[in-house]
Amino acid sequence: MNNWQPHVTVAVIVEREGKFLMVEEEILNSHVDVYNQPAGHVEKGETLIEAAKREALEETGFDVEPIALLGLYTYTPQKAPDTTYYRVCFIANAIHHYERPLDEGIIRAVWLTLDELISSERARSPLVIQCIKDYLRGQSFPLSAIYEHPTPQ
């Protein structure tokens, strides 16, 4: 029997003056706090861009506008070899910040440099650091590289 579980997730890279918008979050029921980009699962009926905007707002209070596709990433944790995460990461601009409650499990939104993130040794997965490195290398693809067929209503 195959128990493999794919998970489609989105994330956004938002940079301001050399710092990146991150979320400090608790890994579910672990009492371990980690840093991640604003990220999460795509919900039924959402486009990838809609999911990225929603996750950023729910986790940070920032409205963001994706301006480019950073890349597609996969990650299978050693501790969960039957789970693979497919991350679609966007480059986005922060448009507006709202004072609002953040998602459950989110401790706070925080701006960190890549060096601060690396030295904390608290990146949620290797993808968190890899996405920032790719961004800093100038990797970028047009949003038109994504075709999303309209969802039937």
Image (cartoon, grey):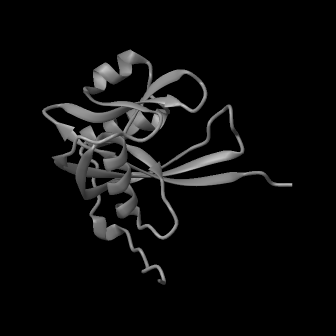
Give me the residue at 39% from left, 32% from top. 129
Image height of 38 relative to 22, above or below? below
Q: Is residue 95 above or below residue 15?
A: below
Give the residue displayed 32% in from the left and 34% down from the top. 22
Quarter that holds the N terminus: bottom right
Instruction: Give the farthest residue toward the bottom.
Output: 152
Say which of 102 and 5 sits in front: 102
Q: Is residue 122 left or right of residue 30?
A: left
Vertical relation: 13 (above or below) 79: below
Percent coordinates x, y for residue 5 in the rendering = 68, 52
In percent of width and height, residue 152 lies at 48, 83
Describe residue 91's horizontal placement relative to residue 151 as left or right: left
Q: Residue furthest top?
A: 119
Q: Which residue is drawn at 72% across and 45% down?
A: 82
Q: Where is residue 31 in the image (x, y as percent from the top left)?
A: 55, 21
> x, y percentage for residue 114?
29, 27
